[in-house]
Amino acid sequence: MSIIPCFFDPFDGFLTSTLSGFPTSAREMLPRVDWKETPEAHIFKADLPGMKKDEVKVEMEEGRVLQISGERSRENEEKDDKWHRVERSSGKFVRRFRLPENAKVDEVKASMENGVLTVTVPKQEMKKPEVKAIDISG
């Protein structure tokens, strides 16, 4: 098992090209995450079916980086068990997202309900630059 870091990048295809060297099972462990921006906050929703909140960590790293990580354990195998198919992924995962300057990184909140982790990062109001008109002589 290995941890697979993944930074959000706004360029299309980044995730696919970054993970192309990893085996399929490693790619499958990366939870799907939606990131939307509202006038008040940045909201992240991660699909983590079957995981409990104590199996997931939400952290803020230096440089306004939101990190979501965790580990899904593999089901115990009894010596008499005969598996016909194993499709559910297990292992560690890490997702990282660099937040914009307007993120209030000290006020991040997280909740988990029905296998969906919701992380809310409030936004601070960005001051518009003051524009001063200059008279043109002549």
Image (cartoon, rainbow, N blue to C red):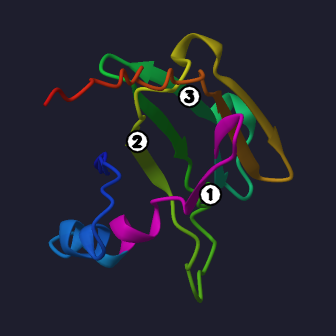
Amino acid at pointer 3: Val
- The residue where tag 3 is placed is 58
What residue type is disc 1 on?
A: Glu
Residue type pointed to by label 2: Phe
* Frontmost residue, 76 versus 24: 24
Between disc 2 and disc 1, whose residue precedes? 1
Q: In screen coordinates, is 30 left or right of 114?
A: left
Expressed as whole percent of the image width and height from the top left, the position of residue 34 reads 59, 59
Given residues 113 and 134, the one toward you in this image is 134
Residue at the image point whose x is 33% and y is 77% from the top: 24
Residue on which the image places disc 1: 75
Which residue has dot 2 on it?
97
User: Horizontal placement of 25 versus 16: left or right?
Assistant: right
Residue depicted at x 45% and y 70%? 28
**How far apart in space, not on screen, are marks 3 and 1 (Cα)?**
24 Å
Please identify the quadrant where the C terminus is shown. top left
Magenta-highlighted residues: 25-43
Question: Mark 2 and mark 3: span between their CA atoms?
Answer: 11 Å
